[in-house]
Image (cartoon, rainbow, N blue to C red):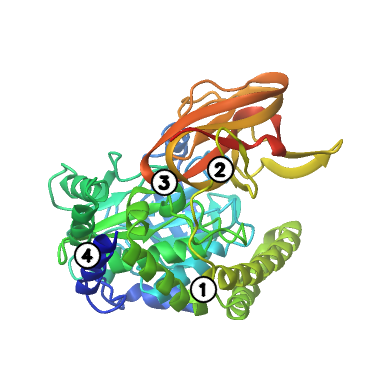
Amino acid sequence: MRNWARLSAAVLLAAGPAFAQSAKPAKDDDSDTFFRTGQIPQLVIELDDAACEALRKEPRQYAEGRLKENNRNVYGEVGFKLKGAAGSFREFDDTPSFTVKVDRGDNDQKFHGLRKFQLNRSPQDGTWMHELLASEIFKAAGIPAPRVTHARVWVNKRDMGLYVLKEAFDRTFLKRHFEKSAGNLYDGGFCQDIDADLEKDEGRDKDDRADLKALLEACTEPDLVKRWAKVPELLDLKAFITLMAVEQMLAHWDGYCLNRNNYRIYFDPATKKAQFLPHGMDQLFQDAEASILDNPPAIVANAVMKNPAWRTEYRKRVGELLPLFNAEKLKKRVDEVAKRLEPVIDSYDKDAASAFKGAVNDLKARLEARERSLKEQRTMPDPRPLVFQADQPVRLLKWRTASECEDATLEAKRENGVDLLTIACGPSGRCVASWRRGVLLPRGKYRFRAVIGAKDVEKLEEEEAPGVGAGLRLSGGSREGGLAGSRDYGAVDLEFEVAEEQADVELVVELRAARGFIAIKAESLTLTRLSK
């Protein structure tokens, strides 16, 4: 291990001055004033009947229309398509989010310097501020991130309310942040890691994914000495350590490191290295105690954190970034933005304005709690593998919630003297929600057990992977079958193997259903080491 540590430290030092970024300072252009002033434009999306019907039938395909700004500026031949993943996607006749391609019919047409941008309804963020705060923190840390403001939106005469307006990842974005903009830009898609066939959004190279494959091979190289020599040749290591630190400090559970979701990868032709870019940051600071010390499950993050010298550098970077999470400064920024947004919300929905005030106060409380936790965790020792006695189950505590839908209810409660973790479907008819717990395990075979009761669980009518109904699985994995209907409490087991010397594993108890309810007996959540 000492030889590996010396090698990794040498590789790290060779990479250059501490936390130098390969991305250049962003160039100023016509878009800077628009985002800097924080103006809230009134935007009307004008679509004829044919375009509306097209978005109902094929929401992921562009339909052509016009965009009117503040009843003055009109942009013609604009492309509109619906966006959003499992938890945030809404149909056209609901309150959808949009990708807006301004130059679809005219290559020279721009919206305040932007060729493409997004309008996000942000149903999972009652403050409409998470994206803005995260973007500003990432940029302050030296990581390129889309700029964010807000807009008041109508679709024809339908009042849609307040939206988050966010610049898109495209060639314009790349030109602002990198010396060369012709490299491959990949979309991480929905819960996919670099071993998936990621969609290429930009780039002039062949579509053979050779750069992604090389990065994957480096991160999974079984010989650790070779792995630690290869990874810095293909990954902007300094930038990735920073991104990893900020994601985890934000408690961005739905980002790349923790959920293999909401990210882009740019292979910079100037450096021949990959840089990860953050995306989809509408669910932040939900768990004030979220760990910044556990090894993340994503392939690249896990490979980096297993290197002793790089992990040391990560912990150092966390300390350097702590001032960006100063709760008093962040609360001041929240109040500034709230002062702009509240009158807009109040103008179309007074009840929503009242709810907004409550959400803002809750966010400020979460910022305070997160800062306290970060300061405490900074001084904690690195996690150690769980210790097992022969064939004796270990009870697992401190479970956290995760949900891909806004109306599922996850509660810890006590009934008839029994501690329960529950998941209940909401009225939307789509529940994908879970209780999760990470654990560091030594090599061996294991049994994960939960005692679960179910009531009126109805399976979702969708693709079965990674599972249907209620069940157990590992994060990033799938399961066969699942509980449906109603049943009394009974044991559910998942057996799995850790082939490495030690590995971080995230255990998942989930409900994927159209309706119904499950309850898990907290004391039954155990892990047994079956063999070494």
What's the CA distance linking mark 2 and mark 3?
A: 26 Å
Q: Which residue is mark 3?
A: 503
**In the drawing, does residue 199 fall left or right of residue 183?**
right
Q: Which residue is mark 1?
A: 39
Q: Nearer the viewer, mark 4 or mark 2?
A: 4
**Quick check: 98 above or below 531?**
below
What element does badge 4 sit on?
A: helix
**Quick check: 420 above or below 178?**
above
Q: Which residue is mark 4?
A: 7
What's the CA distance linking mark 3 and mark 1?
A: 47 Å
**Quick check: 340 above or below 494?**
below
What element does badge 2 sit on?
A: loop
Q: Is residue 466 visible?
A: no
**Residue 267, quarter of picture:** bottom left
**In the drawing, does residue 274 fall left or right of residue 144?**
left
Q: Position of residue 118 (x, y in %)?
A: 43, 56
Amino acid carrying mark 1 in the image: Gln
Q: Position of residue 205 (x, y in %)?
A: 13, 50
Q: Looking at the image, is mark 3 or mark 4 earlier in the sequence? A: 4
Q: Which mark is residue 311?
A: none
Q: Position of residue 340 (x, y in %)?
A: 61, 73
**Residue 390, quarter of picture:** top right
**What crowding class fits label 2: few (fewer than 14 Cα within 10 Å), some (14-19), or many (20 or more)?**
some
Amino acid carrying mark 2 in the image: Glu
Q: Which residue is mark 2?
A: 404
Q: Nearer the viewer, mark 3 or mark 1?
A: 3
Q: Looking at the image, is mark 3 or mark 1 earlier in the sequence? A: 1
**Residue 347, quarter of picture:** bottom right
What element does badge 3 sit on?
A: strand
